[in-house]
Image (cartoon, rainbow, N blue to C red):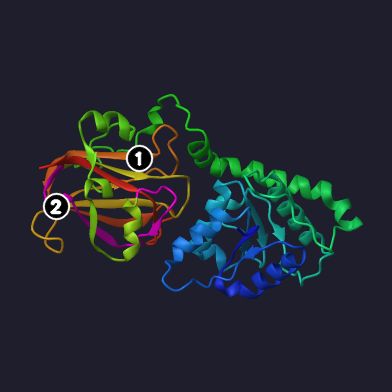
Amino acid sequence: MSDIFLSYASADREHARLLADTLAKRGYSVWWDRTIPPGRVFDEVIQEAIQAARCMVVLWSADSVRSNWVKTEAAEGAARGMLVPALVGEAGPPIEFKRIQSANLSHWNGDEANGEYRNLLASIEELIKKDARPGNPGPLTSPRQATGATASRFGTAKTFAMGAIFALGAMGAYWLFGKVGKQPAPESPASSTSVPAQARPNSIAAPAATVSGAVAARGHVNLLSEEQGGQLLVASTERWKLLIDGKEDTYAWTDTGFGVFGFRDGRAALIDTFTVFVPAQSGSNMKDFELFAGNAAATGSFESIGRFSTQNMRMMQAPYQEFRFPPVKAKYFKLQSLRSHDDSNTSLAYEVQLFGKLQ
């Protein structure tokens, strides 16, 4: 387990190295060298490192604010209440992170007496101290203990840390409540995620429902799950497998790619419901997508079921946003990613499900 996960753009590697080395002098372990072991998948290694860390520091620069990888890592850190941002250039943070105060290390040269670095360090120490996971020790101590200058700034730094944590609520509360306390929430009209019928003639406007509720009541199963024999047959990248692995904390960049899926034993199925897991608000979340049905071959012709759009928020009662369409018989199912919520060709997707009955 590392104490700190350091998120940065490759162009800022020297800034990252300087900060990682300075923090290491204080006895902290920092995950920052992104050398991926042979045989491992890059995003899986990143995900594991984030989950193991007790604090995340993100370095915002003109390069990192344009990096979908950095923004996605920062969003996950914010959702877990462990994010401490720092500026290493003239560019400010992306709009979704502007409410979180950032330390300014743009002109920092490694001086441990620097006020901005001291504030950043105090925020890190505060978050690590609050990490109450079993087996986690308190903040590490080292021969280089805090000086009087550090103590005099502690009140300001603590306010900085607490303010950052409070600001994360707007971005991460949905994720935290969904993971930590899955309490039933009142039904809300705003939870409807189906595309209006007049906008998408192939979709049915209806409120989102939990997978175990209305969908299960119709005797449907998730045909894409491994337990039901679902499998990825053709895709633009191998990472599309992560969309049907049954794990809500794994994700894949779908870009403008596609995935073709098959059902148990190559059988056909009658399908009518598709769901998308949206854990938290993020501009990188997949927004527009199109569904297709095919019966010839996995690489054959497909007919469009319809185009749909997700809402960029976590639905507390039903985090799997549901999209219904008239029943269609298909031997193969195709998902095409179109646009993200920040109007980019690069989209991020977590878990998807397809409900129906095998024929």
Residue that numbered label 1 is attached to: 321
Q: Amino acid at mark 1?
A: Gln
What secondary structure is marked by label 1?
strand
Looking at the rendered image, the quarter that the C terminus falls into is top left
Q: Which mark is residue 265?
A: 2
Q: Residue furthest top?
A: 186
Q: Is residue 264 magenta?
A: yes
Q: Nearer the viewer, residue 292 or 350?
A: 350
Q: Amino acid at mark 2?
A: Asp
- Name the image quarter holding residue 321: top left
Give the side of residue 100 with respect to residue 343, left or right.
Answer: right
Over which residues does the magenta segment extend?
A: 246-270
Category of crowding for the residue at label 2, using alpha-carbon neighbours closer than 10 angstroms: few (below 14), some (14–19), many (at least 20):
few
Q: Residue furthest left?
A: 296
Q: In percent of the image, x 40 and y 31: which residue is there?
A: 190
205 in relation to 101, above or below: above
Q: Earlier in the sequence, mark 1 or mark 2?
A: 2
Give the side of residue 343 with respect to residue 64, left or right.
Answer: left
99 in relation to 205, above or below: below
